[in-house]
Amino acid sequence: MQDSMIKVSEAAFDHIVKLREEQGYDHSYGLRVSVEGGGCSGLSYKLDFDNQEQTGDQIIEDKGVKIFVNIRSLLYLVGTELDYTGGLSGQGFHFANPNATRTCACGESFSV
């Protein structure tokens, strides 16, 4: 897999590093990104810290952040950029997913 399958914006990178330190994880921890059924549009994103590769994982790296993603989720996420917004209206991680044909107002679920 190419390293550019999922990208991390500068703002997301800064917040990932901050959260990782706050939660006591070292640099061996990256993000586990997955897509699950649910949400108002049918599919939802899930983010967790992880440092263990699981069977079927693809490991992508951007800006020094390891991203663990299973192949099923990767099919929905190819070309996605993970961003972070710290503003009053919509603080948190956001996925700019070119594969999504519809998203909900909160941006946490989508459909293809």
Image (spheres, helix red, strand yellow):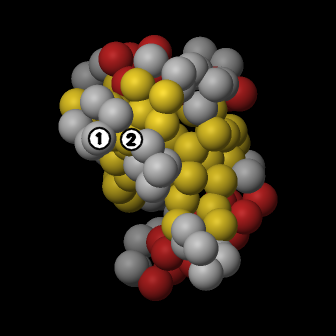
Residue 97, quarter of the rendered image: top right
Residue 54, quarter of the rendered image: top left
Q: Is residue 81 above or below residue 5?
A: below
Crowding near pointer 2: few (<14 within 10 Å), some, many (20+)? many
Calculate the distance from the C-alpha at mark 1 to the C-alpha at mark 2: 6 Å
Check residue 40 in the rendering and tell me which mark sits there, or answer none.
1
Q: Secondary structure at mark 2?
A: strand
Horizontally, residue 66 falls left or right of residue 40, namely right
Q: Position of residue 30 (x, y in %)?
A: 48, 52
Crowding near pointer 1: few (<14 within 10 Å), some, many (20+)? some
- The residue sitting at the right extreme is 10
The amino acid type found where label 1 is placed reads Cys
At 63% from the left and 39% from the top, the residue drawn is: 96
Name the front one of labels 1 and 2: 1
Q: Is residue 86 above or below residue 112?
A: below
Q: Position of residue 3 (x, y in %)?
A: 68, 27
Q: Position of residue 9 (x, y in %)?
A: 73, 52
According to the image, label 2 marks what residue? 109
- The residue sitting at the left extreme is 38
At 34% from the left and 34% from the top, the residue drawn is: 41
Frontmost residue, 30 versus 40:
40
Residue 13, quarter of the rendered image: bottom right
